[in-house]
Image (spheres, rainbow, N blue to C red):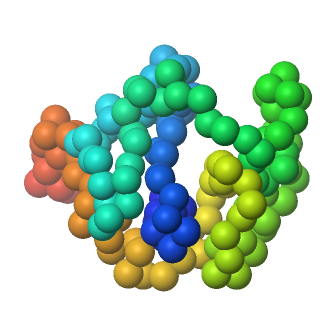
Amino acid sequence: LAAAWRFAERTGRKLVIDRRGSCYLDQPFTNAFPVFFEPVQDIAGVQVICDDRINQHSFPGPFFPAWWNRPAIDCAYRPDEQIFRERDELDQLFQSGQDSDANTVVCDACLMWRCDEEAEREIFRSIKPRSEVQARIDAIFREH
């Protein structure tokens, strides 16, 4: 999230946090982000869309990485090699300091440790767990 946010900040793009299909929920079309975190409209000047409005939103192509330009049926299964290839392509784009000609950049690969610590701190300052999630975190902390 921090790497995608930093890219959006640098390039003047919106950040869409789309966690539909999360292994943490039984509902495949529910975005997991607003289930676990308070709504956020903006992270340090970057407009954020992170609620179920994404179900009605059509993202304009072309897409980067190129895999996402394929027909939806072809994208139903992404082998690990493809995910790793996308991670490397995204890392190269993000580290280059350049933008992409693509209208939509899909960051659907783990880029942990591939951005600066200040970007990570900004994310942690900006997103807050929902109160019921925070209460559970606090209870586990007290218990252990």
User: Would residue 29 be seen by someone viewing this image from the given angle?
Assistant: yes
Q: Position of residue 107 (x, y in %)?
A: 63, 53
Quarter of the picture containing the C terminus is bottom left
Considering depth in this image, is 53 or 108 the residue closer to the camera? 53
| Residue at the image point whose x is 38% and y is 81% from the top | 118
Q: Position of residue 86 (x, y in %)?
A: 78, 57
| Residue at the image point whose x is 51% and y is 39% from the top | 18
Q: Position of residue 84 (x, y in %)?
A: 79, 58
| Residue at the image point whose x is 59% and y is 75% from the top | 114
Question: How many labels sit on residues?
Answer: 0
Quarter location, residue 28: top right
Q: Is residue 20 above or below residue 68?
A: above
Q: Position of residue 41 (x, y in %)?
A: 29, 47
In this rendering, would 109 be left or right of 74? left
Quarter location, residue 21: top right
User: Would residue 77 be seen by someone viewing this image from the given angle?
Assistant: no
Considering depth in this image, is 119 or 69 the residue closer to the camera? 69
